[in-house]
């Protein structure tokens, strides 16, 4: 009897819901399940970007809270149309200004701004610039990492722990194939097969998530 494990396609409900459907549900403020879904889906992304922008843990948590509040306030007027303004861009802009608010709170009224120690423009001015590339680059990097982490969680549900371990050691930890085979007591061919199989699944999940989240 073959021990080959059948790969079942991911169920739609296991993927992050499409942004248009979720945003439509969020327009009902009493839909607590959808708001919980939104928070659980995006709080780590917003929090991570806030931290990498130079905020403290407490300030980053406030950015998350204020961003969610702003989404609740602005959602009735938002029309999901990726051709004009993607959800990703919309959420970035809301997060950007909440980050700016936190930097602004640091400076007492009347205190004059001075260049940073390295002579560059003050941090507040750099972040506050809506066209500034720094925050957008951080956001894009966090967004891609967020999608990758979500894809990995889904792939782990579709393969055996042994297969994922071989893929992880080979692709992420960069162990030689021969070493992996020796340490796990399997053939090199089995390691190659696991790497290929999991890699293909991961690419598929990433593409699916990217289509749903833009």
Image (cartoon, helix red, strand yellow):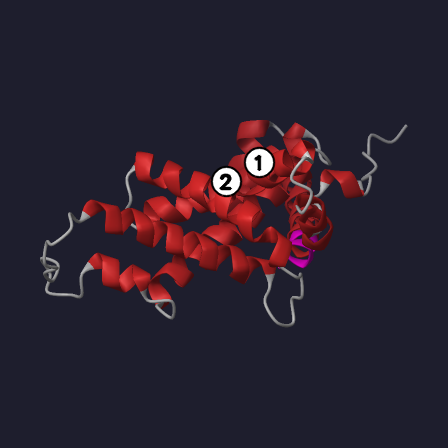
Side of 214 where 20 appears, left or right:
right
Query: Residue 177 appears at what percent x and percent y?
Result: 55, 43
On the question of residue 93 being in view, the answer is yes
The quadrant of the picture occupied by the C terminus is bottom right
Callout 2 secondary element: helix
Within 10 Å of disc 2 (Cα), the crowding (few <14, some 14-19, many 20+) is some
For the point 54% across and 43% down, the residue is 42
Q: CA distance from mark 2 to mark 1?
A: 6 Å
Tell whether 186 sits left or right of 142.
right
5 up-or-down from 101: above or below: above
Q: Do tag 2 and tag 1 residues touch (Cβ < 8 Å)?
A: yes
User: According to the image, label 2 marks what residue?
Assistant: 43
Residue at (68% x, 58% y) in the render = 211
Q: Nearer the viewer, residue 160 or 92?
A: 92
Mark 1 Cα shell of 10 Å, populated few (<14), some (14-19), many (≥20): few
Range shown magenta = 208-214
Q: Residue at x 56, y 45 (%)?
A: 72
Circle on res. 40: 1
Q: Between residues 131 and 6, which one lies in front from this camera angle?
A: 131
């Amino acid at each position: 009897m073959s021990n080959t494990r059948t790969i079942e396609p991911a169920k739609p409900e296991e993927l992050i819901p499409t942004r248009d459907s979720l945003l439509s549900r969020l327009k009902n403020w009493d839909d607590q399940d959808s708001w919980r879904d939104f928070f659980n889906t995006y709080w780590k992304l917003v929090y991570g970007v806030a931290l990498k922008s130079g905020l403290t843990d407490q300030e980053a948590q406030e950015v998350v809270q204020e961003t969610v509040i702003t989404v609740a306030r602005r959602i009735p007027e938002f029309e999901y149309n990726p051709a004009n303004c993607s959800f990703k861009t919309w959420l970035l802009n809301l997060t950007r200004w909440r980050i700016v608010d936190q930097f602004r709170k640091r400076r007492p009224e009347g205190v004059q701004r001075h260049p940073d120690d390295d002579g560059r423009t003050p941090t507040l001015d750099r972040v506050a610039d809506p066209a500034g590339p720094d925050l957008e680059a951080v956001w894009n990097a966090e967004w891609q990492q967020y999608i990758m982490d979500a894809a990995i969680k889904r792939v782990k549900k579709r393969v055996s722990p042994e297969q994922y371990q071989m893929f992880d050691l080979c692709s992420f930890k960069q162990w030689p194939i021969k070493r992996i085979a020796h340490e796990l007591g399997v053939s090199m061919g089995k390691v190659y097969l696991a790497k290929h199989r999991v890699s293909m699944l991961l690419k598929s999940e990433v593409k699916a998530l990217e289509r749903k989240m833009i």
